[in-house]
Image (tube, rainbow, N blue to C red):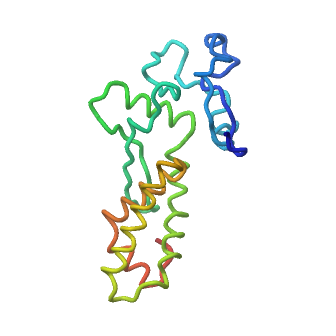
Amino acid sequence: MANPEHDVEHYFPKGLRFFYMLMLHPYNLYFTCKTCNSSIYKSQKMPLENEQDNLQTTFLPFHAGAQEEVAFQFSRGTLGDSIQMIPSNPKAPHVEEKIRNLDRMFRLEERWTNDLEAYASSLLSHYSEEFAADEYEDFKADFSQMVRRRGRAVETNPEVTIESAYYSWLLKEKIGSIFETIKKDDFSG
């Protein structure tokens, strides 16, 4: 059953003459959040740069979505953490073009990067009062358990994919600095 906060959208816009035969085809319909389907993001944008491009340069949600071919790379810069979509298999053909087309339509990297600050704030808020300065191992064990729970939640709730991947990255790369931030009560990240 569809979520009332989601739309059923035409992947290839119904108004384009080149793809008119897909207008009502079930393979051209997919569920999307209202934000993604807004005029700011997907709206009537083409999944291809132009009508002559090869279909292999775009993800086709009815055939194989991006989840299998895209990995996430996080980094910390002067403006905070950021996310970039990268091919999970760099040797796979056309994946970089697919990622570029997907991001062009939905501006996912920009939007997800903006979400990371909220995830970090939520995390710091959750843990700020739970652990004393000498309880690093307890904190790390609890955080690891939370990351595993989030990872399992992705199977039934794909909307937490980015949050889960971000927390996994933090656990692997930044757990010590997170603990120090919590102990200083510095919520700026």
Q: Along the horizontal axis of the image, is 89 left or right of 118? A: left
Q: Please tell me which residue lies in front, 17 or 126.
A: 126
Query: Looking at the picture, does residue 18 appear above or below residue 56?
Result: above
Residue furthest toward the left? 91
Q: Which quadrant holds residue 41?
A: top right
**Residue 78 spot, x, y in % from top left:** 42, 62
Residue furthest toward the right? 4
**Residue 179 spot, x, y in % from top left:** 38, 78
**Residue 169 spot, x, y in % from top left:** 36, 59
Q: Please tell me which residue lies in front, 116 or 22.
A: 22
Residue shown at the point (42%, 55%) measured from the top left: 151
Q: Along the horizontal axis of the image, is 135 left or right of 40? A: left
Residue shown at the point (52%, 22%) measured from the top left: 48
Q: Please tell me which residue lies in front, 93 or 28.
A: 28
Query: Looking at the picture, does residue 77 appear above or below residue 138?
Result: above
Q: Quadrant of the N terminus?
A: top right
Query: Looking at the picture, does residue 141 appear above or below residue 35?
Result: below
Residue furthest toward the front? 1
Q: Which quadrant holds residue 30?
A: top right
Q: Along the horizontal axis of the image, is 114 left or right of 25? A: left
Total marks placed:
0
**Residue 88 spot, x, y in % from top left:** 33, 39
Query: Looking at the picture, does residue 5 appear above or below residue 148?
Result: above
